[in-house]
Amino acid sequence: MKKSEPKKLPEFNSLKKLVEFFETHDLGEYWDQMPEAEIDIEIKKRKHTFTIDEDIAVKLTEIARTKRVPAEELIKLWLKEKVSEVV
């Protein structure tokens, strides 16, 4: 069986027309004709979760409240300070 010629992608004068076209057509049939796209992304830092004893969590929360900062921020600050002392 003979392979059929790839379909030629029509030209569109608006993004709306392009979207309407692909609502009724298979993008896979036109994939080779699609322009390459450059994407700028910013990878965010990963977050890690650690468990701590309840009594320490309560004390940290109390200290954070007196300093008027979120407990998470206080913990990050203290950990950063302690790690920089060791490194």
Image (cartoon, rainbow, N blue to C red):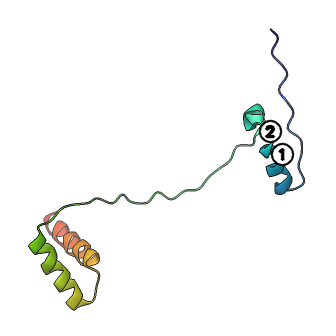
Q: Is residue 68 above or below residue 60?
A: below
Pointers 2 and 1 in contact (C-beta within 8 Å):
yes
Observer-nearest of 40 and 23:
23
Quote the CA–CA distance across marks 2 and 1. 6 Å
Observer-nearest of 61 and 40:
61
Q: Quadrant of residue 24?
A: top right
Residue at the spot of label 2: 25
Mark 1: give few (<14), some (14-19) or many (20+) Cα within 10 Å: some
Residue at the spot of label 1: 21
Residue drawn at (43%, 60%), measured in percent from left and top? 44
Residue drawn at (29%, 81%), measured in percent from left and top? 70
Residue drawn at (22%, 74%), measured in percent from left and top? 75
Mark 2: give few (<14), some (14-19) or many (20+) Cα within 10 Å: few
Q: Is residue 50 above or below residue 61?
A: above
Q: Secondary structure at mark 1?
A: helix
Q: Is residue 17 left or right of residue 32?
A: right
Number of marks: 2
Q: Quadrant of residue 48?
A: bottom left
Q: Quadrant of residue 35?
A: top right
Q: Secondary structure at mark 2?
A: loop
Q: Is residue 66 above or below residue 44?
A: below
**Is the N terminus in the top left, top right, bottom left or bottom right quadrant?**
top right
Q: Is residue 63 above or below residue 81?
A: below
Identify the amino acid type marked 2.
Answer: His
Identify the amino acid type marked 1.
Answer: Phe
Residue drawn at (59%, 56%), measured in percent from left and top? 40
Q: Please, which residue is most extreme toward the top here? A: 1
Q: x and y percent of residue 47 in the render?
A: 33, 60
**Is the C terminus in the top left, top right, bottom left or bottom right quadrant?**
bottom left
